Amino acid sequence: MTIDVNRLIRQDCMDGITPLKRLLLSSTLIVLALSGCSEQSRDQSGATLSGGGTAAQMSYGYSYHFTLPGDVVTQAQDRHIAMCDQLGLSRCRMQEMHRSAGTGSSDGSTRFVVASGDARKFGQDLIAPVASLNGTMTSREFEAEDLSKQIADAQAKAGEKDTVASRMTLAEAQNRVVTSAIWVYYDGKTAFGEQIGAAFGDAGETMRSSIIALIYFLSAVLPWALVLGLMFFVLRAGVRRFRDMFPRARGSGLQHQERNRLDERFAHDPQVPPDGLS
């Protein structure tokens, strides 16, 4: 809208309107014109991201990955949990924690639920305790989800049929909007010298386990071996005693074997005279 001030002043003189009254009228027209432009620009650009008349109901999630020395993973995790405790249960809660340690490495993870207004700052504050322990943040991830339609549908269902399931669905969706989930992952790396020491420790443990297994094996096998050995010697002694009880049968058996050997010898060498002939 364009206002010609000179034309208005000339018209004032003709109509008998004082310049002060015209100034007040002009100011009113300018305000109305600016208001119309503002309404027009709002209609062209859209009022909200969700495309409706209300603000979008967004759910946010964060994840942080840290790498630090393996022997301080527990300290970093405990400091982050202490940070959450300082905010209070109404603003921060720890919902899940995991820790593990092995040869040459250790790791852990923690899941926090933080009020949406505190989530971003809480995530930034996680970096300082890790940096003080010679650790670094290796990656950071962020995700957002628009729950506007889900909440609107849940509200409509709750209005049509007020059931426990509908109320729980609505409450869960609304809770995801007012709170944010923050996952923190810890990747601990052990120094090379400590890895060598741990390897020797594992070797000693393996040897100890092997000796224990050998003892169990001998304790299971040795009694049976002694029993079988005793049975063998008893049986052998019995056979010898039986032979001593029947010497004639033993002697006749030897003579019969000797005669068979002589017969075979004469069959191959007929020049040899039989016994008693020269």
Image (spheres, helix red, strand yellow):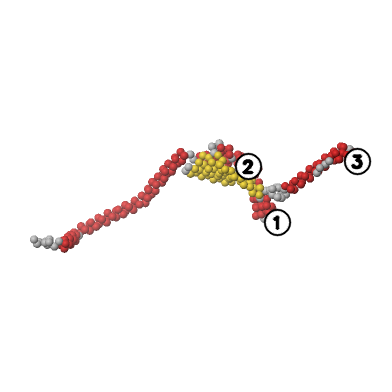
Residue 98, located in which quarter of the rendered image?
Answer: top right
Query: Residue at coordinates 39% horizontally, 48% vertically from top-left?
Result: 213
Disc 3 marks which residue? 15
Q: Quadrant of the N terminus?
A: top right
* Closer to us: 225 or 204: 204
Residue placed furthest toward the left? 278
- Neighbourhood count class around disc 3 (C-alpha, 10 Å): few under 14, some 14–19, many 20 upward: few
- Residue 154 lies, in percent from the top left, at 67, 53
- Judging from the image, what secondary structure is the residue with disc 2 in? helix
- Residue 81 lies, in percent from the top left, at 58, 41
Query: Residue at coordinates 44% horizontally, 42% vertically from top-left?
Result: 199
- Neighbourhood count class around disc 2 (C-alpha, 10 Å): few under 14, some 14–19, many 20 upward: some
Say whether residue 161 is left or right of residue 29.
Answer: left
- Judging from the image, what secondary structure is the residue with disc 3 in? helix
- Residue 188 lies, in percent from the top left, at 52, 42
* Closer to us: 208 or 276: 276
Query: Residue at coordinates 31% horizontally, 52% vertically from top-left?
Result: 226
Find residue 120 and name its label. 2
Q: Hey, what amino acid is under mark 2?
A: Arg
Q: Hey, what amino acid is under mark 1?
A: Glu
Disc 1 marks which residue? 160
* Closer to us: 12 or 97: 12
Q: Earlier in the sequence, mark 3 or mark 2?
A: 3
Observer able to see residue 196: yes
Query: Residue at coordinates 43% horizontally, 43% vertically from top-left?
Result: 202
